[in-house]
Image (cartoon, helix red, strand yellow):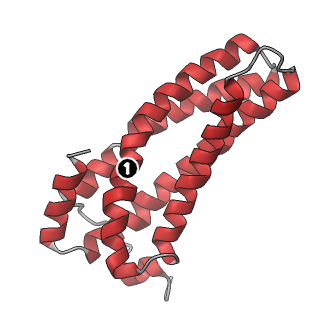
Amino acid sequence: MEGCMSSMMGNGSVALSRGLKQLKEEHPPLLAMLEELLRISLKIEESPDKAAFNLLTEKVRSFIQALDPHSEREEGVLFRMMEQYLGKGTGPIAVMEYEHDQAKGYIKTYMEAAENTENMTGNEIAHHAGLIKNAYYTLTQHFAKEENILFPMAENLLSENEKTELYNKINEI
């Protein structure tokens, strides 16, 4: 695609440096957890059940524990480093941060609702399970964008010293 950002940055297969490779390798376990969340969410939407909702809540808590450090490594380190080249507030980094916020918003709203399931109707249970389904779709598409566009772009933008700095900093988190 002539003129698009991926063509400017090289949309072919790119060998990733250690830090970027590590970030990419954190995706499959998160995706496996997301698949389980989706499966439970769809079951709840089909047949609202408080026990399944409680199971989903436990699984969401575990997912949050795995997702938070990954997000911090991206938002706190990689995105900040890439802003020097791509700017702040618009462009790919703004999109990536928006998607992080969107997914976290779905999860936060779900967890707030999960605090009080006693008087929840079947429709409410199904609605809240749908929030996790939305987080699933947001994050699976987001991870694909990172792997296919953002990480190769970072590989091409960052200097060797910056790549070493990225690796060291993400391993402090």
Amino acid bearing label 1: Glu
Q: Residue at x 39, y 73 (%)?
A: 11
Q: Residue at x 31, y 50 (%)?
A: 23
| Residue 135 x %, y % | 62, 43
> From what the image shows, is residue 49 above or below residue 40?
above
Q: Residue at x 55, y 20 (%)?
A: 58
| Residue 110 x %, y % | 67, 34
Relative to residue 22, is residue 67 drawn left or right?
right
| Residue 142 x %, y % | 52, 55
Number of marks drawn: 1
Visible residue check, residue 10: no
Q: Quadrant of residue 10?
A: bottom left
Which of these two is toward me, 95 or 146?
95
Q: Residues within 10 Å of mark 1 (few under 14, many from 20)?
A: some
Relative to residue 119, is residue 11 drawn left or right?
left
| Residue 123 x %, y % | 87, 27
Q: Which residue is mark 1?
A: 72
- Quarter of the image with the C terminus is top left
Secondary structure under tag 1 reads helix
Which of these two is toward me, 13 or 131?
131
Which of these two is toward me, 113 or 45?
113
Q: Quadrant of residue 29?
A: top left
Q: Residue at x 69, y 19 (%)?
A: 53
Which of these two is toward me, 50 or 41?
50
Relative to residue 82, is residue 63 drawn left or right?
right
